Image (cartoon, rainbow, N blue to C red):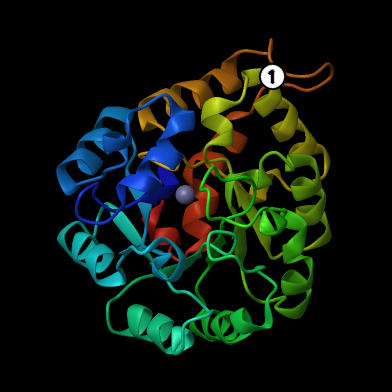
Amino acid sequence: MIIDSHVHAGEYYRHFTTAFADQMMATTGMPPEALSAPEAKLIAEMDAAGVDRAFLLAFDVRRVEGFSVPNEFVAELCARHPDRFIGFASVDAATPGAADRLRHAITELGLSGLKTAPCYLRMSPADPRWYDVYETARELGIPVLVHTGYTPAKNADGRYFSPLLLEPVARDFPDLKIILAHLGTPWTGPCVELLARHPNLYADLSIFGSYRPPATVAGALAHARERGVLDRVLWGTDFPFATMTESVDRMARLTKDSEPWPDGSAPLTPEEYRAVMGGTAARLTGRPDLFTP
Ligand SMILES: [Zn+2]
């Protein structure tokens, strides 16, 4: 059972602007049009990679980028494929009514988590305007996936890239499960240390696991294991910014091949692999029924 914990819904002409697609895809080696995940392409990619389920993300950056991937759109895909997709809503805390929109997306549209994009919205994830939204997520018992780390989006604010900005949020909401996207790339070391400080924090491997050298990925996983937080690290791709097939291959190699691992660190055990590839994601959604090893 494999769960991709970071997958973007949305289609090139229908949702994303060409400027955004140009900037975001430039670093992937794929054309801007590849920033598109229509229903058939999503399912085909999951099937090809052996991915059973995906956290499917809405994306609200309308205030800054002029577009959004709406919660309603993600909810429709989830309703058509309830056995494949676990939907995450997205809201912008700087637009009025954000907490109410989140509540509506969970209780009325049937979504199961929240995705936020603070640096894209030129806000810190610790900005007080998010606190209503976090409190609502806590009440609803849903996880919050926060973009952390670098992004090539030109309108984003680099002051808000660091995963360490989540320190006060983790402290103020000890019952809220927060996933730091991209393991805070390139600040993966500080990200792992932050997880070690706060048991409510998780991190996903999207982009990092697909594009960094295997030795760098193995080094970060070894660090997470040494700090006792490997059971809070989730595999994910950021599809369509990275392919699922290649990423699954790369992860499988980290269970077999000791070559990329630092001296004294063994490859992932079968239990560690199962947890990273889906067990932890299923636990996080409060739906252990989603996961059968
Ligand atoms: Zn993403």
Residue 168 image offset from top left, x and y in percent: 78, 72
Q: Nearer the viewer, residue 278 or 39?
A: 39
Query: Eyeballing the image, is 247 above or below 8?
Result: above
Report the quarter where the C terminus lies.
Answer: top left
Side (left or right) of 40 relative to 198: left
Query: Eyeballing the image, is 122 above or below 232?
Result: below
Side (left or right) of 193 relative to 129: right
**Residue occupying the point 36% across, 64% down:** 66
Q: Quadrant of residue 88?
A: bottom left
**Residue occupying the point 25% across, 42% down:** 42
Q: Quadrant of residue 249?
A: top left
**Residue occupying the point 62% across, 45% down:** 150
**Is residue 160 in sight in this rendering?**
yes
Task: Estimate how packed mark 1 is, as few (under 14), some (14 to 19) or many (20 or more) residues with alpha carbons within 10 Å.
Answer: some
Q: Identity of the amino acid at label 1? A: Ala
Residue 169 image offset from top left, x and y in percent: 72, 73
Q: Which residue is mark 1?
A: 215
Q: Nearer the viewer, residue 264 or 217?
A: 217
**Residue occupying the point 32% across, 35% down:** 32
